[in-house]
Amino acid sequence: MKKRKTARIMSLFLALTMTSLLAAGCGQKSSPESPAETSGASSEPTYKDTLTIAHWEEPTTLDPQAQGKMSCGAVTVQIYDTLITLDENKSPVPALAEKWEQIDDTTFRFYLREGVKFHNGDTLTAEDVRYTIARACTNPGSSSTFKSFDGENTKAIDDLTVEIKLKSPDASIYDTLNGQRGGIVCKRAVEELGEDAYGHAPVGTGPYKLAEWQTGTELRLVANEDYWGEAPKTPNIVFKIITESANRVIEMETGNADICLNVLASEVARLEEAEGLHVEMGTGYQYTTVTFNMQDPVLSDIRVRQALVSAIDRESIVTAVYKGTATVADSIMPTTLLGAKTYDPNLYDVEKAKELLAEAGYADGLTINFVVQPLEEMQRITEAIQNMWKQIGVETNVSTAEVAAYLAQGNTLQVGIRNGSASDPASTLIIYDSAFGDRLNSNNAELDQMLADAKAIYDVDERAAAYNEICDYLWEAKWSLPIAFKKTIYALSDKVEGFEFDAMNYLEMEKISVAE
């Protein structure tokens, strides 16, 4: 999620140290008054009371346990806090929990801060945490992520102590608790409003609270006056929902937005040339992968999957779509993650693809159903793949739809594209777990066991070795074809202060201010 509190003590120390040095330096005499001082003019900068964000997609809900999309998380992380956050070394640091201890391989005890208030005025208690964990284990939007958590046996020991139980050892527990699905909800608010209504009237303990949601247009957040941490620098945030990337750029160029999230590679050059703007770009955890349905009768033949993979020129796609802001994927998961193993990325071989299809009984070709979300990046990749597959006699029926809605209508999905981002290998590879479902529709018991075993290893080196083996297994099986490992890209007004790069698009908005 965010490293919201990790640097505060050090920042305060540095600020006090610099103040002392400035006071002690250059002698003890005060300098003559400057013209501005003698004339009574103020040199103090003034700041906007509203931070405006150009957001690429409207959240489906602001219930942290009901979803996992980055577009939702960019907003929910402003509204909710988690028990812990992770520092730059991915070690847990205090947030709502001041301290914690691991009792045994499946028992973790957390001690909460006293006096933390929810946005509705309720005081945070261990019962709210217990309730959050229990619902995370059963909500379809989070149950696969919390698969190893034992919601039934997690308990509130007293008002400020909660004991989280696991069904099996889980080395990714802190990553899960720090993730957007780990946002702590107010039990009373959820029960009184009901699950659906709560998603549009969220109650957290975070630095901002929802003030207004104009469907299809914008979300307005206001500072939480009872926030337990440092007060937000800017009292108001507006997330403008602008799905067209060109229109988000226009909002930045005209000064109607201060920050643009999830900038597309095609817009970087234009933004870099715009006056008063700059681009912040860095290595993250984002990946794009083509997924094959593991239960589909056609795709269950590895020769078909190998043929489809061999016919895709990934280097051409990455060059055309990402324009220097991504690399051709040379692993199953981003190489920034523990246990990632790299391979020769050169898989393109049209003649081999034709031979494999013929061996599988499709010398005359076949037709594949391809479902793609209504996002420019995904559609461009799909168009490229369509043309490449035509060279080996594979036609595609493309449906543009949100995958969840498509599947909910009773449709089956053969091939899709997934954009994902996670900071732990267990979270990244969860899409291959049978419990996850979705695009891959996994049903592989051997793979399920390998994933469970790796997740249960607390020793870092042993865990890395286990994920190396899983990478080998998946690279050979070709249940997916990783296309690109992408950089995270932001556009900012030059007047923005306090920005700290986040690889997941989950900015610490409370630290940001914008000069007039």
Image (cartoon, rainbow, N blue to C red):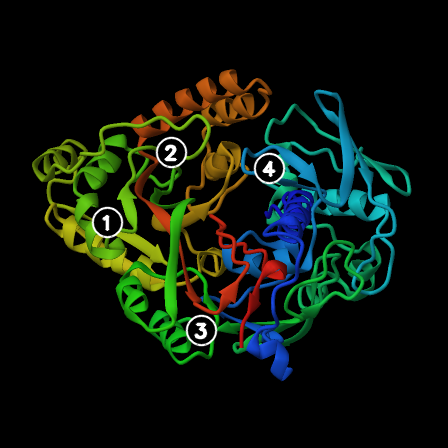
- Is the residue under label 2 in contact with that under label 4 (CB below 8 Å)? no
Q: Report the amino acid beneath label 3.
A: Ile
| Quarter holding residue 273 | bottom left
**Label whose residue precedes the other's in the sequence (3 or 1):** 3
Q: Report the amino acid beneath label 1.
A: Val
Residue 55 makes an appearance in the image: no
Residue at horizontal 64 percent and vertical 33 percent from the top? 173
What label does residue 242 carry, if any? 3
Q: Distance between the residues labelled 2 and 3?
A: 31 Å
Residue 29 makes an appearance in the image: yes
- Is the residue under label 1 in contact with that under label 2 (CB below 8 Å)? no
Q: Distance between the residues labelled 2 and 1?
A: 17 Å
Reply above or below: 330 against 42.
Answer: above
Q: Distance between the residues labelled 3 and 4?
A: 30 Å
Q: How far apart are marks 4 and 2 (CA)?
A: 17 Å
Q: Mark 4 points at which residue?
A: 175
Residue at the right extreme? 158
Say few, some or many: other residues with alpha carbon within 10 Å of mark 4 (under 14 / 14 to 19 / 20 or more): many
Q: Report the amino acid beneath label 2.
A: Thr
**Label whose residue precedes the other's in the sequence (4 or 2):** 4
Q: Distance between the residues labelled 3 and 1?
A: 25 Å
**Label whose residue precedes the other's in the sequence (2 or 3):** 3
Q: How far apart are marks 1 and 4 (CA)?
A: 29 Å
Of helix, strand and loop, which one carries label 4?
A: helix
What label does residue 335 carry, if any? 2
Say few, some or many: other residues with alpha carbon within 10 Å of mark 3 (under 14 / 14 to 19 / 20 or more): many
Q: Is residue 108 left or right of residue 216?
A: right
What label does residue 343 carry, if any? none
